[in-house]
Every structure is written in structure tokens, then in C-alpha cells.
Image (cartoon, rainbow, N blue to C red):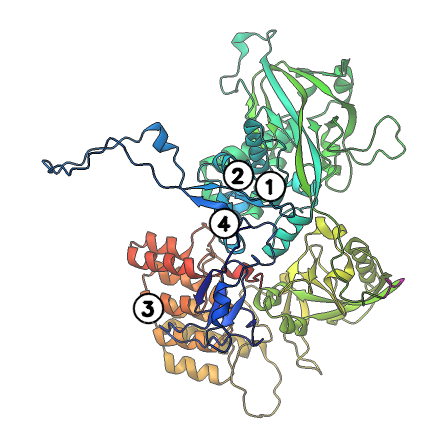
Amino acid sequence: PIVVRHHWVHRRRQEGKCRQCGKGFQQKFAFHSKEIVAISCSWCKQAYHSKVSCFMLQHIEEPCSLGAHAAVVIPPTWILRVRRPQNPLKSSKKKKRTSFKRKSSKKGAEEGRWKPFVIKPMPAPLMKPLLVFVNPKSGGNQGAKIIQSFMWYLNPRQVFDLSQGGPKEALELYRKVHNLRILACGGDGTVGWILSILDQLRINPPPPVAILPLGTGNDLARTLNWGGGYTDEPLSKILSHVEDGNIVQLDRWNLHVEPNPDTNPEEKDEAAADKLPLDVFNNYFSLGFDARVTLEFHESREANPEKFNSRFRNKMFYAGTAFSDFLTGSSKDLAKHVRLVCDGTDLTSKIQDLKPQCLVFLNIPRYCAGTMPWGNPGEHHDFEPQRHDDGCIEVIGFTMTSLAALQVGGHGERLCQCRQVVLTTSKAIPMQVDGEPCKLAASCIHISLRNQANMVQKTKRRNSMPLLNDQQPVPERLRIRVSRISMRDYEALNYDKEKLKEASVPLGIIVVPGDSDLELCRTQIEKLQEEGDGAKPKTPSFQKLSPKWCFLDSTTADRFYRIDRAQEHLNYVTEISQDELYVLDPELVVTQTVSTSPAMPDLVDSSATPPGHHFAFPSSSSSPPSSPSPRLIFDPDASLFADDLLIEAAKNGNFSKFQELHRAGRDLMVRDSSGQTVLHHAVKSGSKDIVKYIIENAPSEILDATEEENGETSLHQAAALRQRTICHYIVEAGASLMKTDLQGDTPKHRAEKANDPDLAAYLENRQHYQMIQREDQETAV
């Protein structure tokens, strides 16, 4: 077999430790420094100090293992370069140029189909090669941020941007690869797009598809245990889940539409469509109230795309539109214009009695961002529990009452489980197919089973037992201490486990069975909260958790990361914690208070903080230790005034005053009322000395801190102001070049908009050298 060699690259910045001596890589911040600190392999991520005692000559020719994700990486030996075909009729003699006019060359059909490389797979039964498709527009443009990360972990030739021509060409290129798997990064619509292309290409057997959920609803991703949305789980762990996941089947359904011949042509709605946006669905097909809301959202997004650049904003628009439609009662007469026949049984009279405002034909258990409209029939012998692979479709009717109850665990009116449906409408009605809406003219719609697709389901597994020795059995009971972390501490100290643990506040102790998953732990923690509701002192331990709290994994990666609530049943408590269980409480803020223990942080509700008052956290900055002084009572107003002076000095570019205030103990991580840091203000004032001083003395988290109004980092503002030297300072200090503002712009885009092509070219060049964006710094070393 052909051996893969290491691809050694010089690095000016390197995470982790040297494989030879075990020491970290010294990365002293120095401007314009081009010193090489490490030599690392682009494939397996092994890294050595750039000196003879660590990196020896024999390493150059050693075979490469391709690293922790070798089973899913496409080896470089499989990729063969193809030379561009030469025109055989081209004369060998050079003709004398007679005109300076450039002739337009038209590519022939053959040249248009030319590809720069082909795939020649080698037999490898243990491999599960992966194709990654990323939709950069899904979920508030979140997809654009992770393409670079996947290219770092994998072979860049196996990562594809769906906005650059779709998935068809890549699937054709890799169709002969054995054991191929696909990772679709996007919403449920992205998954449906890939499955439809697989149908067209008739690849046999069809490769199974895993999902990294970036969309708004993500119901299919929830069904297959991939969660309701991507937060900050390390991509290396997601690759492991894709490799280890089980292959399951997913029913797919045909939608055949014909015009209703019984309707009067004069009554036809001119705005109505003659066909549905898709002729196949994987999740659900619906008509009535929910489709009307989706249609209004879709039309508004098409008209103003810049207003729909975050998942939260999208959900808020859905809620507002649904409320206005509820008030107008626009779908009340749905039952009068629908005829329904399921497996030959006419259910029209049942619909007219129910008078639903929404009809849903459901293939998967989840609907409308995680609700379960079929519910659990239990002892109801007329219906079976719902499955996504049983060849049956569930028909459900919703009144306004049952739609409201759906959000608190209720279900709709179960009408039928069947294999074929004939739906006839007598007027134009809003409909949606897997989230793609339209207003369909009066039609006759036939629903029938199309085929079954292979999907990858995330499994519940135990890789390790951090609390236990392998020889010991799982204990019957576990006594676990629970501590919570505020969102601001989490964002500031995310990559420093020890500091984050120190910043946590004890919540209490729970006792659970040894093999408990996080769902059971959640119920115990909520019981702990109920017991603490009595007349107890207002100390951090007894402050109630907010409804949006979630678990943090503190052991399986180089940093803490959030666990999606929809995936709690997949994680054992012994996997994600060692001696303590940590939870993240996003709605609480830590401030300093006057007490007998001055260093003890207190927890207060963020809504109780007066407008414009932003108190600093116990700082982790490298401020010089102050000399011993008499103990003073903490005065928030005095502290706030001093912090204002620090911000004022940065605004005015007064370097000596700024330096003096910092040496007196002022916190460099302070923010003003709009969330801007002192670095933002120093950039605006153009003071290179203050910028340099902040970078050298403040925690590195300040580099990627964003202000609240536009979501801009200091690098965004420096690029927009065309401050080249300051941009260089911030970039070389390690700021993220992939971070986007609320408009989806990176610093490079801001430089382009400011008409500074040289600065934009510099930022783009540095972006290529940046190993991985700050949002996901864990490597496979």
C-alpha cells in the first residue's frame, strides 16, 4: 500500500505541547516577529519545537497516521491531479501578433467539464471517509464560521461550500468511495437537498447522512439525536460522533400535484402557485395556519435578508407573525375547503367536525422546533407509536387550542396512520413542504412512499469513565457536587479550565444512580432548587437557576463546552464530569458585593441592574499587584467613576493618564454602557501606544470582545477605519479573523467596504495562516 508521509509546516503560533520534550510552545508577543516556534504536521497535528533536540531528521520521512480522525480523512494519496487537456490542433509555430485586441475564447463542452483532480480510492475496510457539505447561509450565517475549522481537521478536498454550486459535483466525484459518509451542516432543507441529489445520482448503496444542525427548526436533527442547534461543541468531537453513529432508515414521501378540475377558473387566485416548491418531503407537509406564518417569514426574509442574520431574530419574527395571524383568524375556514382520503377511507366529515386551523402530515416525531404533536398513544390501541422508518405517515389536526398546548407538552388530534393520502382543496391555501412555503391553487395532492434514505443517528455511548477505575463496577449511587457558571465568566474564561472552575459558584449536592444520564440529573437539580425556595438567605448557593440553564462538559475536551438540552439523554454524568458537575446559567451576572468575604462573588438577576450600570467581574487580567493598603468599603459608584476615567483616557488617546489609571488598579476588561471595551475606544482614537499597551497587559479575551450594537470586535473597527498598523498589532496578538459582526462581515469584508484593498489582502492572507478560529481552538493533537 502507498504510505502517507507527514506534511511538515513551520508555525509562528502553536497550541498544545511538544511531542518530544512535553513542554509548551513559548509565544512571546512581539510586533513584526517572524520567529518560528514549532514544526507541525498538517495531517496528524503532531508538533515539535523548532530545534534539533526536538525535531530530528528521521521525522521527515516517517509515515503519517493522519491523526485522531484518520478513519474519516480522505488520504492525500487518493487524490490524483489531472492536467488540463491541450488543444491538439494548436500550431507549434508562434504566429506574429497582428492585433492587440483580445479574442474571447469559448470553452468547449469537454473543457467546461474538466476537473483539476480525480479520486482513486484504495481498499480500506476500516475507513469511513467523510464528505462535509456546509450551507454558509443557515442559522443566521453560522455556517460560514465553521468551514475553515473543518478544513483544518480534514482534507480541504473533502469540505464543500454549498453556495458554490451545490452538492452534485462533489457527490459524483466521490461516488465510487466505499463506506462513504456525509455530514450535512445546515438546516433540514440542506439535508433534503443532499438527499434529493443522491436520488438523482442513484448511488448504490446510498451513503448515510449525518447532521450538524445550523438552521432554525432542526426537527430532523433532533429526531436523530444531533440536537436543536450547534452551540460550541468542539468539531473534533462531532467528527467522532459521525464516525461512531448508527445507520438508520428514514422514510421519504412523494407529493404529486394535479389541478382540481371542479373549481371555477374565474375564481383562481393570481398570486397562487400551480405546484409545490418540493415534490418530496422528509419531515412533514402541512397546510393552514403554520404554513401561512412560514410563508410570511419567507417573503419578509427575501425582501430584507439583512434583518434575518441570527437564529434568535428569526424565531422572534416567527412568534410575532403567529400572534398576528392568531388575532385575525385567517385559517378558520380551512375545513370547508378540504377533502381528505387516507388509505381509501374518507375522513372529510371528521375534519369538518374538528374544524382544525392546521393539518399536518408527519413523517418524524418532531415538529415546529422540537415539539411532539403525535405524542405517546400509550394505551390508545387505535394508534401505534410514531417511527420514521415504518412506511406510515401520521395525519394530525390542530385547533388553536391544541396548537397552544403543543408548546407545553400537548399533542394534536390524531386522525390517522396510513400509507397513502389523497388531499383535495377547493381554493388557494398556504402550504409548506419541509419548511419551504407557498400558496397553492386549488389542487388534488397524492402522497405516497418514495423510498428510504440512510441516515446516521448519534448514539449514546460510554467512551471513558473519568470517575472510575476500569476494573471497578459502576457504583449504585453517586454523590455529586453541582456548581454553576455565569455566561460572562464562561465567555471570558472559556479556554482556561482552572480559572473557570475558580469562578464557579456552588449550588448544592445531588445523589443519583451510578449509570445516570443528564436527563435524570436535571430532574434532581430542579428538585434541589425547589427545596431551596424556602426562607433562606440570599447567598449565591440559594439563588434560583434561570429556565435556560444547561450542562457543561468539563472533561472530554481541552475546554468547557455546552451540551444541547435535546442531547442530555445521550450523555452519562460520569462522562462529562470528574469531581464536580458544572452548569451554565445564561441569565445571571456576577458582581462584587460588600460582605465579610470580599472575594466571594454574588449572583444577581441581570434585569435588576440599573440601566447603564455595568459592574466588572472579578478580573483575571494581569494587573500589577497593588501595595498593601487599609481595607476600604466597596463603593460601586466610585468604582464606576474610575472606570469611566479609564474609558475617557482611551477615547482621548491620553496614554500617560491611561497607564497611570491601570497601575492604580483599574480593570482593563471594563466596558461602557454599549458594551465597548477600552480597546474599542483606543482603536477609534487611533492611539497606537494605548492599543499596544492594552494588548500586552489585558487578557487575550479582549481581542475578540464584541460591542452590543453591531457585534463588532476592535479588529472590525480598525479595518473599517483603515488603521493598518493597529490591525497588524491586533492580528499578531491572535485575534480571530473569522469572527463576523451582526451583518455577517469579517474584518476583511470591512476593509473592502472601506476601499482599502491592500489591508483586505493582508487580512485575507493572515486568515489562511490562522490555524483555527477562536470559537473552536481545540486541535486533534
Q: Is residue 631 above or below residue 582?
A: below
Residue annotated with mark 4: 77
Magenta highlight range:
472-476
| Residue 687, x across and y down, in percent | 35, 73
For the residue carrying disc 4, how many other residues have a C-alpha within 10 Å: few (<14), some (14-19), or many (20+)? some
Residue under the point 55% across and 68% down:
613
Q: Is residue 639 above or below residue 99?
A: below
Residue annotated with mark 2: 174
Cα distance between the residues tagged 3 and 4: 42 Å
Residue under the point 64% across and 55% down:
237
Main SS type for the magenta part? loop
459 sits to left or right of 310: right
Mark 2 vs mark 3: give the one in front.
Answer: 2
> Looking at the image, is mark 4 or mark 1 earlier in the sequence?
4
Residue annotated with mark 1: 180
Amino acid type, label 3: Thr
> Looking at the image, is mark 1 or mark 3 earlier in the sequence?
1
For the residue carrying disc 1, how many other residues have a C-alpha within 10 Å: few (<14), some (14-19), or many (20+)? some
For the residue carrying disc 3, how many other residues have a C-alpha within 10 Å: few (<14), some (14-19), or many (20+)? some
728 sits to left or right of 583: left
> Looking at the image, is mark 4 or mark 2 earlier in the sequence?
4
User: Answer yes or no: do the residues labelled 1 and 2 have beta carbons within 8 Å?
Assistant: yes
Mark 3 vs mark 4: give the one in front.
Answer: 4
Residue annotated with mark 3: 725
